[in-house]
Amino acid sequence: MANHFIQSEKLATLLKQMQQKLDELPSDESTEALKADLAKAKKEHSRMAFMLERMHKDKAIGIKLLNQTITDLQKHQKLLEESNRLLSEQNKIVEKQSEELAQSLRELEHFSYIASHDLQTPLRTIVSYAEIIQKRYTAELDDDGNTFLEYLMTGALQMNGIIEALLEYSRIGRGEQNLVPTDLNNILEHVRYDLRKELQTRKVSLKSASLPTVMAAKNTMRPLFLHLLETIILNFSETDAVIVTEVKKQEHTFLFYIFEQLHGLPDSFPTHLIEPGSGRQSGQFPGEGIGMAVCRKIILQHKGNIWVEKQEGRGKVIAFTIAC
């Protein structure tokens, strides 16, 4: 670039000298033509000199910006390296905490299984002796005594149901979970038989579209549909109800809908019955709520989800997905 400036200055000097020589010559046609050509050359030289100076300034600015960019990139590189280091440390902490949490959950489920199992023995003793008292001493007890004894029997049986539900909940996911083809139409027929007493008593009928065969862990689909349908039956006050099960095939999942065809599920139907014991908080609906917690655990085990939604013309609908 410096060499270009030297050449430009030499050319300017040469043009000046030529102008002086032409000024000394007598004025005629040829001299005037030379002067005109010289004027054009000087004008072009001025333009080129301006461009050269501008290029020199632009180059200086570009070099300065490039150096600043390099400096900024170096700073960002250091910040990125530090961020990666911190992220790596955080990931190690999260992995460790996740493993500790998983271990705690395994220990808690194991404790729940052992505790629930061990509670059954003294509970059976209570029920057995209550039955003996009821058989042998009913005549000797007054009305209050027989009523209290009946309360004792009912409470003990309810407690046994809760313990069995806890055992069922803690068994889900234990041991090897090999997936096997499971025909849900057969599952629904078994569930219909399991719920025959409730269906008859409450005059409820079950309808279903043709259901698919899914890859499921052994002995999980029957309790899933049993608890789902039982929850609707027990929490539905209308008689002559028709509970319908429908399914839609999606890209990676089967989407199931369970709803009441004639009346729709009531607005007060509990949407929170998906965690152990949550159904007991309101006191408005029967059941301990563990059944829906079992459902949720089974569905999550099969990479699905469960929720309650409102649909036009149907009201509240239980919806859940299971991986194809």
Image (cartoon, rainbow, N blue to C red):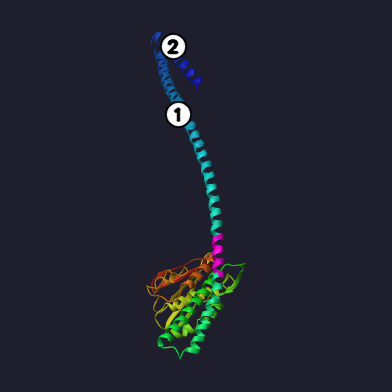
Compared with residue 182, is residue 204 higher up or lower down, i.e. above or below? Answer: below
What kind of element bears circle 1? helix
Q: Nearer the viewer, residue 323 or 277?
A: 277
Compared with residue 43, is residue 21 higher up or lower down, i.e. above or below? Answer: above
User: Residue extending furthest front?
Assistant: 140
Which-is-in-front pick, marks 2 and 1?
1
Q: Position of residue 267 (x, y in %)?
A: 37, 73
Residue located 43% across and 85% down the image: 145
Q: The residue under label 2 is which amino acid type?
A: Gln
Q: Which residue is mark 2?
A: 17
Q: Quadrant of the C terminus?
A: bottom right
**Visible in this render: residue 227?**
yes
What kind of element bears circle 2? helix
Overall secondary structure of the magenta section: helix
Q: Position of residue 91 (x, y in %)?
A: 54, 50
Specify the label residue 220 is tagged with. Answer: none
Compared with residue 111, is residue 240 higher up or lower down, i.e. above or below? Answer: below
Q: Position of residue 164 (x, y in %)?
A: 53, 75
Q: Is residue 107 magenta?
A: yes
Density class for disc 1 (Cα within 10 Å; few <14, some 14-19, many ≥20) is few
Res. 48 image quadrant: top left
Q: The residue under label 1 is which amino acid type?
A: Ile
Q: Which residues are magenta?
A: 103-114
C-alpha separation, residue under disc 2 versus residue under disc 1 = 35 Å
Q: Is residue 182 magenta?
A: no
Q: Nearer the viewer, residue 300 or 253?
A: 300
**Visible in this render: residue 212?**
no
Q: Nearer the viewer, residue 247 or 187?
A: 187
Density class for disc 2 (Cα within 10 Å; few <14, some 14-19, many ≥20) is few
Q: Is residue 106 left or right of residue 137?
A: right
Q: Which residue is mark 1?
A: 61
